[in-house]
Amino acid sequence: EYPNVDQATQKEAAHSQRPRTIREPSQDEIWELTLLQAVHTAVQNNKMIRTRTNSPQLLQNPQTTPSVFDPALGETGYLFGNRGVEAALADFDTQLNASTTWGNNATIQNSFGTFQNNSDTGAFTSSLTKALATGGSFQVNHNWNYLSTNSPFVPVSSSYAGTLQAVFTQPLWAGAGVEYNRIAGPPRAGLGSITGVSQGVSIARINCDIDVADFELAVTQMVKDVEDLYWELYLAYRQYDAEVANRESVHRSWVEVKAKMDAGARGGSAADEAQARENYFDSQARVETSLSTIFVTENQFRKLLGLAVNDGKIIRPADDPMEAEFIVPWESSVLDALTRRAELRRQKWQIKSLELQYRAAENVANPQLNLVSSYQVNGFGANLLNYQDTPNSSMYTSMGNTNLTGWTAGLRFSMPLGLRTVRMQLHNIELQLVKARAGLAAQEQDISHDLAESVQRI
């Protein structure tokens, strides 16, 4: 009913002091915090990157929340469609396969008399396969079979027969070339008719760069929110100071009117006293509201910094805003925004990825024409290995003499009539590329408008 997870609860969450409220005043130590210290604290404490808007996401599904682990998770991705560089490079690793089986079989032979045929068999197969960056593959196979039988029709009752074979295949049309295989990766078994063009090393590297850009965007947003809340807390303190000063002024006015009313002097009527008293209570309410705003904003600030709700200290900004006039250089600001914004860099990586995929899709939208070739050395002998220099005494001895050889060479052609799937893939990637470029243009336009709005506000 409840998962038994061996992880201690964070002490900042479980052992925090009571939150501050206006009904329970306390004498807290004042923590004079600079903006630079606040940013450093947020970066140091938040492995899960907190912003002012992602709290519901962090509570409901932390796995989708940006974190410091995301770039490394992208680098180590291994599933199809979400592979890192190492996983993409692993497609070119040499594959070793080997197997051996042994058996015995007894049967009744009914030819030229009836007798019981006993045979012992053995088989060994092994292969080394290397996928090449050109799209081809090179394979070395070594196989041998053992047969021991009492059949009178077999000249050698116990024998070994084997081959050492080299096989080379190379695409000449679809799937050929280093560029295609770096983009799409070599063909993978088990995917049926799917011809993906986004599983190569180049695309994996771009995906990792996109993960880094996403991480940079999340950190930038967190730092911006830290600074925004820092100055909101600064403003809350100033508003509180102003309300306290206003309350003291209103209180003095009320005291003066009440003194006049008690003395029966002019300006001291009951209505004047009631109005002054109402003004005082209204100012006291504004003081308590502004104090509550300080507590709420300070708690939000603590949450963004990854601190406990209450550790006996109350944060007060130590820095003051700059008061010098700032003239925004429009041309250079636009150039910086269009050059440095991580959103644009991320979108440009997407466009680059789609451009590469389009080139790979153009390659694969052709018939398959492959060169196939092989060369093998055969061997036969009564023993697997010995040092007697007699005919057919050893399989490996006869194989070493290289008298028994064979070779093949040819072409293999295949294509679905119409090439409908690969052409639809090409058209789909082309549409994605057009949309990505339109998205980049829209992003650049929106950034210029946002920058203009910021200049107008300044």
Image: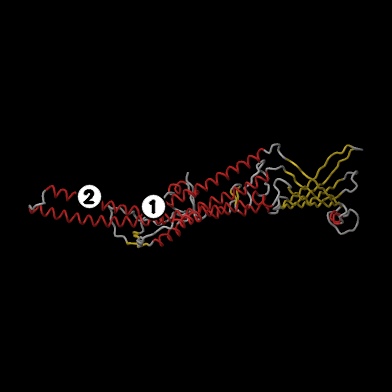
Instruction: Estimate the x, y position of residue 185 in percent, counting from the top left.
Output: 66, 49
Q: Which residue is mark 2?
A: 282
Report crowding for label 2: few under 14, some 14 to 19, many 20 or more residues within 10 A (C-alpha): few
Q: Is residue 268 visible?
A: yes
Q: Amino acid at mark 2?
A: Asp
Instruction: Estimate the x, y position of residue 248 in percent, counting from the top left.
Output: 21, 57
Instruction: Estimate the x, y position of residue 26 in percent, counting from the top left.
Output: 29, 58
In the image, 286: left or right of 419?
A: left
Report crowding for label 1: few under 14, some 14 to 19, many 20 or more residues within 10 A (C-alpha): few
What residue appears at the point 72 percent right and 42 percent down from the top-left corner? 367
Q: Which residue is mark 1?
A: 456
Q: Is residue 14 visible?
A: no
Instruction: Estimate the x, y position of residue 132 in percent, counting from the top left.
Output: 71, 53
Which mark's residue is nearer the viewer, 2 or 1? 1
Quadrant location of the C terminus in the rendered image: bottom left
What residue appears at the point 83 percent right and 45 percent down from the top-left corner? 119
Q: Is the residue 322 above or below the residue 92 in the image?
A: below
**Going from the N terminus, do you reach mark 2 or mark 1 first?**
2
**Of residues 321 and 84, which is closer to you in this image?**
321
**Of residues 210 and 435, which is closer to you in this image?**
435
Count of numbered badges drawn on the protein: 2
As drawn, the residue found furthest toward the left would be 264
Q: Amino acid at mark 1?
A: Gln
Secondary structure of residue under mark 1? helix
What residue appears at the point 24 percent right and 50 percent down from the top-left corner? 285
As drawn, the residue found furthest toward the right would be 112
What residue appears at the point 14 percent right and 50 percent down from the top-left corner? 273
